[in-house]
């Protein structure tokens, strides 16, 4: 099966304060198959976010990134990013209009069709009652739900998530993790999800990568734990210990 | 909620009204004490009468209409030009570097200083006044729009690119709405500067073909030593300013940036 995402020898430099360049990503190779849910773990500063931003097209890089065979250089609606920051929604648009905006850009003119789609997707994340609200009237969890809806409605080939739940309280995070799993199962999307939380990776991921401080992928493991994963799941402890050791 | 809102409104309005009453009482007291000569310091009644007379006998409505029409023309052209140039600045780096320099050069240049040249070019007519108004609006407006663009959060720009906005559509899709607090404050400054430019120009070369505006009226009344009417004209200018501030700008803020939670 041809991979959805194919990354070959991806390198990324940042100009540092001196004359030199510091290398963040040192030759990443990665193939992602359709419908995979990849979680990337790694210490702060290892380049997880940079990797995601390269895939999103926000950064210049050397190497090759192919999405369904197409070379990726600039941002595009075929892969959407959900950021950690709650303020990624446009404050001047209601939740509904935020979610409908990508449809308009896609060329869907019919108001009824946009309405139908946004109603459908907002229903899925339980935001139907809040569709007329402005982002500043919502809680952090609701904002992230709306941001995920905005990403989903574009029906992208790939959803990139940069610690979207990291700033949420534990209860809301648990709930959103469950919702995301259901969405992934129903919508058959491919997801790359960055987290620093091993438990979150085990709950969500079908495959877990660990990046190290050398800007390389150090570990690439399938997550065969049966969903829904809880700390009581068989094999959970071994996997947790293995990733924890790799992160040290 | 509603009673709370009403209370807030009273807290907002009452001090303002009391302030005006205080000024009027103070004025009248100074007048009755005859501290200043009556010729330069007329009574409130005289100013009131001159106010009414200006509308009844001197067709103040038409005078104001002429001034406001000129301002509207200058403002609209100035604002449109400012938007176009600022949008080009965000799209093209070389345009930005030149344009920001041009703004820095021309913004501090008083419109009145350009008046002699403007009169040579356009004569003593409408065109000169509109030229001055455009000059006084375009630079502060551009500065504000560009500041707004520069302070648009990177996150919103990336979110915009993410959902398919391109290099040009991102200007109207993200940069402009994200800059609305700056744009509204730019409009305020632009309006104030345009008003000043208009009145100065009218006072310097008087009437245009279609007759004089409020600045000319003010100038003539000073010349004829009708001091009460001069004060009445100032009151008219102040009232107009209040209408624009509370009727237009405050409303615009309430319907946009306040509703969107972008300002307190």
Image (cartoon, coloured by chain):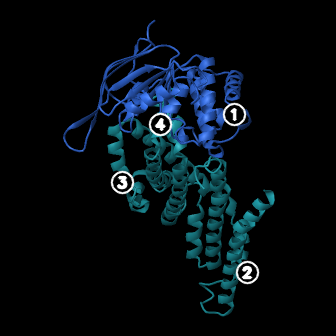
Disc 4 crowd rating (10 Å Cα; few below 14, some 14-19, many 20+) is some
Q: Of circles 4 and 1, which is in front?
A: 1
Spatial separation of the CA atoms under disc 4 and disc 1: 25 Å
Chain identity of mark 3? B
**Quarter the C terminus of chain B occupies:** bottom right
Disc 4 with disc 1 on a shared chain: no
Q: Nearer the viewer, residue A237 or B145?
A: A237
Q: Of circles 3 and 1, which is in front?
A: 1
Disc 3 crowd rating (10 Å Cα; few below 14, some 14-19, many 20+) is few
Residue under the image location 44 percent in, 8 percent down: A2
- Element type at mark 2: helix
Chain identity of mark 2? B
Q: Which residue is mark 4?
A: B157
Labels 4 and 3: the sequence-earlier one? 3
Chain identity for the colour blue used in the image: A
Q: Which residue is mark 3?
A: B104
Residue under the image location 65 percent in, 43 percent down: A138
User: Which residue sits furthest top?
Assistant: A1
Q: Colour of chain B?
A: cyan
Q: Are marks 1 and 2 in contact (CB under 8 Å)?
A: no
Disc 2 with disc 4 on a shared chain: yes
Q: Nearer the viewer, residue A86 or B82?
A: A86
Q: Of circles 3 and 2, which is in front?
A: 3
Residue under the image location 69 percent in, 91 percent down: B32
- Element type at mark 1: loop
Q: Nearer the viewer, residue A214 or A143?
A: A214
Disc 1 crowd rating (10 Å Cα; few below 14, some 14-19, many 20+) is many
Q: Of circles 4 and 3, which is in front?
A: 4
């Amino acid at each position: 099966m041809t991979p959805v995402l194919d990354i070959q020898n991806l390198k990324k430099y940042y100009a540092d304060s001196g004359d030199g360049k510091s290398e963040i990503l040192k030759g990443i190779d990665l193939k992602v198959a359709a419908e995979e849910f990849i979680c990337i773990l790694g210490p702060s500063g290892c380049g997880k976010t940079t990797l995601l931003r390269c895939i999103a097209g926000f950064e210049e890089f050397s190497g090759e990134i192919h999405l369904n065979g197409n070379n990726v250089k600039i941002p595009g609606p075929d892969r959407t990013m959900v950021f950690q920051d709650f303020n990624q929604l446009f404050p001047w648009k209601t939740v509904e209009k935020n979610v409908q905006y990508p449809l308009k850009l896609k060329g869907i003119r019919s108001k009824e069709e946009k309405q139908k789609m946004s109603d459908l997707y907002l229903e899925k994340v339980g935001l139907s009652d809040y569709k007329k609200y402005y982002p500043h009237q919502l809680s952090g969890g609701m904002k992230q739900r709306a941001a995920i809806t905005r990403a989903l409605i574009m029906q992208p080939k790939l959803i990139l998530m940069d610690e979207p739940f990291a700033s949420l309280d534990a209860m809301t995070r648990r709930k959103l993790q469950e919702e995301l799993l259901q969405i992934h199962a129903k919508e058959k999307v491919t997801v790359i999800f960055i987290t620093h939380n091993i438990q979150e990776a085990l709950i969500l991921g079908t495959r877990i990568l660990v990046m190290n401080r050398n800007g390389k992928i150090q570990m690439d493991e399938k997550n065969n734990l049966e969903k829904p994963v809880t700390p009581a799941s068989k094999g959970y402890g071994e996997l947790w210990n293995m990733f924890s050791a790799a992160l040290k | 909620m509603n009673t709370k809102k009403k209370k807030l409104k009273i807290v907002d309005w009452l001090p303002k009204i009391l302030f005006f009453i205080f000024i009027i009482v103070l004025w009248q007291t100074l007048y009755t004490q005859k501290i200043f000569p009556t010729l330069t310091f007329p009574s409130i009644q005289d100013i009131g009468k001159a106010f009414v007379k200006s509308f009844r006998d001197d067709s103040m409505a038409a005078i104001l209409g002429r001034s406001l029409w000129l301002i509207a023309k200058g403002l609209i052209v100035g604002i449109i030009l400012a938007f176009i140039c600022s949008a080009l600045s965000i799209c093209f780096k070389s345009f930005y570097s030149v344009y920001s320099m041009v703004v820095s050069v021309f913004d501090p240049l008083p419109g009145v200083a350009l008046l002699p040249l403007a009169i040579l070019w356009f004569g003593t007519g409408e065109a000169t006044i509109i030229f001055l108004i455009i000059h006084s609006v375009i630079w502060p407006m551009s500065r504000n729009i560009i500041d707004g663009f520069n302070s648009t959060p990177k996150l919103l720009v990336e979110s915009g690119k993410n959902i398919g906005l391109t290099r040009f559509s991102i200007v109207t899709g993200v940069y402009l709405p994200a800059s609305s607090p700056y744009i509204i404050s730019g409009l305020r400054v632009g309006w104030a500067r345009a008003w000043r430019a208009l009145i100065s120009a009218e006072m310097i070369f008087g009437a245009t073909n279609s007759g004089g505006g409020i600045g000319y009226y003010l100038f003539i009344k000073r010349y004829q030593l009708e001091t009460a009417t001069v004060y009445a004209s100032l009151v008219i200018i102040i009232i107009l300013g209040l209408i624009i501030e509370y009727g237009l700008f405050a409303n615009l803020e309430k319907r946009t940036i306040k509703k969107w939670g972008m300002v307190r």
